[in-house]
Image: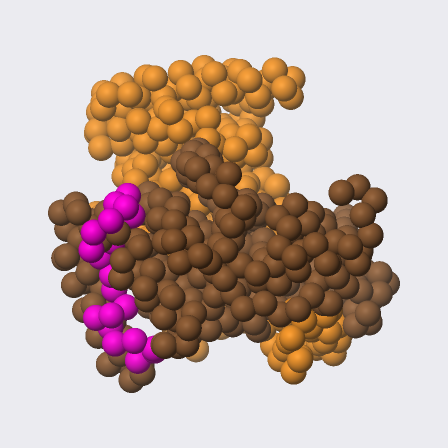
Chain colours: A brown, B orange
Amino acid sequence: MAGMGVTALADRVVEGDPRACARLISWLEDRQPEALSILAGLPVGRALRVGVTGPPGAGKSTLVDGLVRAFRACNLKVGVLAVDPSSPYTGGAILGDRIRMQGHAGDPGVFIRSMGSRGQLGGLSEATDAACRVLAAAGHGVVLIETVGVGQSEVAIRGVADLVLLVLHPEAGDGIQALKAGILEVPDLFVVNKADLPGARATRQAILAMLDELADLRGEEPGLPPADRVLLVAAEQQDGPLAPRGALAERLLAARDGRWQPRGRDVRALVRAMVLRRLQDHLEAVPPPADLAMPESAAETWLADVVRHVLQTGESDGS
Amino acid sequence: MAGMGVTALADRVVEGDPRACARLISWLEDRQPEALSILAGLPVGRALRVGVTGPPGAGKSTLVDGLVRAFRACNLKVGVLAVDPSSPYTGGAILGDRIRMQGHAGDPGVFIRSMGSRGQLGGLSEATDAACRVLAAAGHGVVLIETVGVGQSEVAIRGVADLVLLVLHPEAGDGIQALKAGILEVPDLFVVNKADLPGARATRQAILAMLDELADLRGEEPGLPPADRVLLVAAEQQDGPLAPRGALAERLLAARDGRWQPRGRDVRALVRAMVLRRLQDHLEAVPPPADLAMPESAAETWLADVVRHVLQTGESDGS
């Protein structure tokens, strides 16, 4: 594909060529100037973007794997964007999960890619949203975006996903009270995973109780009644009522077909995170003041230098 | 203390009054204009700042509790700054640990305070450094800064602590390889906690092996030989060779007395984090552009507006 023209690349993305998608996403990750203009020219595809989040050990990757099988059985092309974790403590486990997903490697209807996070955008790569647009233009009906839940990522995922799934361990029941209200408000659907293990029903009840409290506080009900938003799933199962291809896949397909309305994407949050990333880049490019004896004063001086740098590099002229 | 003058407050801090310390720290957290000038006028105290970090469940709070007892037995005043976690999944456990620390509530030589983190500065509050300066001026010989290790905080703690302890679970052995090199380079001392449980010695060996690898790569040995940097501790024990008041407290006191040199504070990293926080505040104060259809272009427009806001509010004139 070396030397391939820009128009040819765009055409091949629209034809659904996975190698062309991968190439364009790489260019976007590298912030190649041409990549953005290709992106702006692509047709807007119709893909449901599903954010899959939750704490380490909840079984997110196994669930994603089960959902891929379910959507493939419906003849939908599926994209999977796995955002590498920013937490050093879970690095090993996630890598192993990545390898497990290779079971789909021979299926041209499944596009799988890891996106580096570098700790920015609450664990999401800046290019994640752009990658979703590429995959939608290439005819993927669903894009699953898997992130590790470490606080900020649950909120950040709202910036790129139409619908957010929070995956929890079946024994999370007692810990539900510790989930901050701000986190509980993000997911459209809660998946109590490994639901063949003890504790799953109690965990579901604890989530429902919290949702009831929230509804009393806020007086609003997004999309579905609470009882329909909390699902018992056993991600490892291929068939039966707890399998991902059962009620969970059905509910996602219903969202895709407009039979219920998830909360939708918060583009403003995405753009805010992108601005913050740019500010950080400028900060990294400007050396600190020589005198750091009083950190507060030094911070003011450095801030002034950073602003000067933004103005000088001309990235602030809206070009 | 209402209506108390600024000079009187500074005097009472220097006399070691805990209520005056608490008041000044609150003012600093609220960014009261007078607080910074009081801070700049305080004498520079001699406190060893010990950062205590590590993953949830490693027993950091119990260790801090044991160290407080050890330093009190040496007649040192001790400050404890507990940075509230940004991870929603550990909120409950940390709150419980806070309560356990109340055992020192009747001791005027122990100052304990939770600092809100709001997810900034890698889990550290902007006022954490200022609080350390207040406590040092008030005659505290040691300040223990406890943070939850979720990736960034291990690096951020270097900005405020003279010496960093990484606390690990005794069964962390297999997970050591998953700790990124950047994290392993931060701690001066590694504490394998709950060392009366199986696996502790193997975990210590795994850490030593990683340190050997690092030393081969970088060719430098900070402060102590590797074998002296990895300690087996049982934080719950009051006495005996594994108790915090044993080898661990001795090693910290040796650092305080200059008998070995820990890596020391990275003030530049602290100031960088403070600048980033200011940039974030400006971003929050500026409304997003109306057209968000292409996130990348919208981000450029918003960035230009933020820079204009910094210039207009005059915080960038170095005052």
Left or right: B114 in relation to A124: left
User: Can residue A224 be found in the magenta stretch?
Assistant: yes
Left or right: A237 in relation to B311: left
What is the quadrant of residue B32 in the picture?
bottom right
Q: Main secondary structure of the magenta part?
A: loop
Q: Nearer the viewer, residue B184 or A175?
A: A175
Judge whether B163 appears above or below B223 on screen. below
Judge whether A304 appears above or below B254 on screen. below
Whole-percent x and y of residue A262? 40, 73
Left or right: B61 in relation to B30: left
Q: How many marks?
A: 0
Q: Which quarter of the image is occupied by the N terminus of chain A?
A: top right
Q: Residue at x 57, y 73 (%)?
A: A268
Magenta span? A221-241
Whole-percent x and y of residue B24? 46, 63
Q: Nearer the viewer, residue A30 or B100?
A: A30
| Residue B286 shows in the view | no
Q: Residue at x 39, y 71 (%)?
A: A255
Q: Which quarter of the image is occupied by the C terminus of chain A?
A: bottom right
Q: Nearer the viewer, residue A268 or B318?
A: A268
Whole-percent x and y of residue A13? 67, 56
What is the quadrant of residue B190 in the picture?
top left
Q: Residue at x 22, y 33 (%)?
A: B236
Whole-percent x and y of residue A194? 23, 47
Q: Nearer the viewer, residue B309 or B260?
A: B309
| Residue A241 shows in the view | yes
User: Can residue A265 be found in the magenta stretch?
Assistant: no
Q: Residue at x 47, y 37 (%)?
A: A102
